Amino acid sequence: MVNVLGCLVFGAIFGVSEHRFVLGPTARAFLLVGVLGGFTTFSSFTFETFQLLRDGEYVLAALNASGQLVLGLVAFWIGVTAARIG
């Protein structure tokens, strides 16, 4: 739920700042990368993938999304396996 909430808030802030120019670049970066990036890195990952899709970089977006998922699962498995051994 934290990741979903982070994505929702990230999208809302990004949308408002992009369409209404309410936030300057410094405030936008602080809120999106600093605050929400600390709240959930998933929101940053989602934003990066969204930007790739919006820019028409469909292959890179798919590689980013699938790579993050696969590498995350592999890293998790390695962590669990290492904990069992040690």
Image (cartoon, helix red, strand yellow):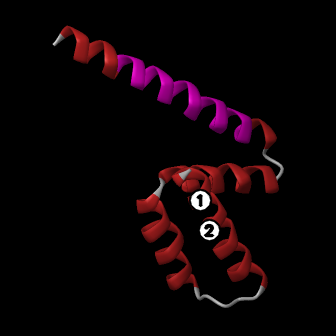
Residue depicted at 68% across the width and 66% down the height: 11
Mark 2: few/some/many CA within 10 Å (<14, 14-19, 20+): some
Which labelled disc corresponds to residue 5? 1
Which labelled disc corresponds to residue 21? none
Q: Are marks 2 and 1 in contact (CB under 8 Å)?
A: yes
Q: Amino acid at mark 1?
A: Leu
Q: Is residue 1 above or below residue 14?
A: above
Q: Amino acid at mark 2?
A: Val
Residue depicted at 78% across the width and 82% down the height: 19
Q: Position of residue 54 (x, y in %)?
A: 81, 56
Q: Is residue 51 above or below residue 24?
A: above
Q: Position of residue 5 (x, y in %)?
A: 59, 59
Find residue 75 and report its image quarter.
top left
Q: Position of residue 35 (x, y in %)?
A: 44, 70
Is 22 within the magenta?
no
Q: Which residue is mark 2?
A: 9
* Relative depth, front residue between 48 and 72: 72
Q: Position of residue 27 (x, y in %)?
A: 51, 84
Range of the magenta residues? 60-78
